[in-house]
Amino acid sequence: MKLLRFGSPGRERPGIVDGSGSIRDASSLGGDITPESIADGLLARLAEADLAALPVVPPGVRLGAPIARTGNFIGVGLNYADHAAEIGQALPKEPILFNKAPNSISGPNDTILVPKDAAKLDWEVELAVVIGKRTSNVPQSQAMTAVAAFTICNDLSERAWQMEGTGQWMKGKSAPTFGPLGPWLVTPDEIPDIGNLDMFLDVDGERMQTGNTRTLVFGVPFLVAYISRFMTLEPGDVITTGTPPGVGMGKKPPRFLRPGQRVRAGIAGLGEQSMVTAAA
């Protein structure tokens, strides 16, 4: 099942993709896709819906972030072996965690705003996990029962803010539009092997990142279990799991985003994003 939100910013409505690829308006089945509606069983109701009875949404409609009002937006650093190698970092012995501000989340095709004093804005295509129920100290063997869906995140990162000065990652990853999600939430039943998904990211048509989730250092079940040791995960929380090689700071010489560029990112089975950068 592929779920999404469509419409103008602040007025998004829930939708579901039918077998032909058309978007159906699911507003009549329980309201917006939020932490509260996920906790209340919205995904189960949508799975049982007669999609043919739902109105078709006209093509070309704006897609918003596929979930509203996310509470916790958690990132994982250096979680691909080949990415750690490209930037000369040792593999971590346990996951590196950081926060992204939840209000950095934007739609999959929305404009990326380049802050006026940004100098090293980088791209990072990532697999993101959406939590489906309150979860604390879950064993790894049961961790996937806490996962509601998967989606794509572009973990945009201002490297100067992240690594220079006091070097706090949250500073470099939390500006408005630094967390595009979508296009859809894809339920686990549609992904046969979350540990073997091809990933890519292009800038202005040039392939920058090519990877596969099989090179994750810490896989999804481990991450959910690990994070739930230190905090209670809630429905609608997002964990973005790290990026494969090809980031701008790993290029020789480094390359960073500037206004007026096109960024396209995708993961097999999870769709694609297409964004243009512009000065904030």
Image (cartoon, grey):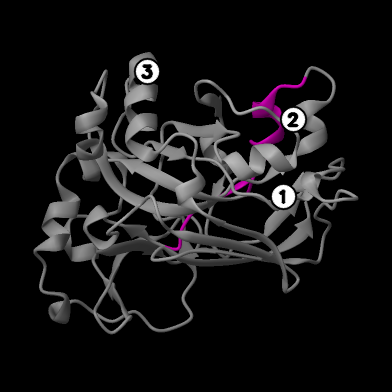
How far apart marks 2 and 1 lie (CA) works out to: 14 Å
Q: Are marks 3 and 1 in contact (CB under 8 Å)?
A: no
Is residue 132 something one can see in this rendering?
Answer: no
Mark 3, residue position = 231
Find numbered disc 3 in the image and state the secondary structure of the residue it sits on: loop
Three-letter amino acid code of the residue under disc 2: Gln
Mark 1, residue position = 247
Three-letter amino acid code of the residue under disc 1: Val
Find numbered disc 1 in the image and state the secondary structure of the residue it sits on: loop
- Could you say where residue 158 lies in the image, as x and y percent from the top left? 76, 39
How far apart marks 2 and 3 lie (CA) works out to: 23 Å
- Could you say where residue 244 lies in the image, as x and y percent from the top left? 60, 49
Sequence-first disc among 2 and 3 = 2
Magenta stretch in the rendered image: 167-183
How far apart marks 3 and 1 lie (CA) works out to: 29 Å
Q: Give the label on residue 105, or none.
A: none
Q: Residue at x 40, y 55 (%)?
A: 196
Three-letter amino acid code of the residue under disc 3: Met
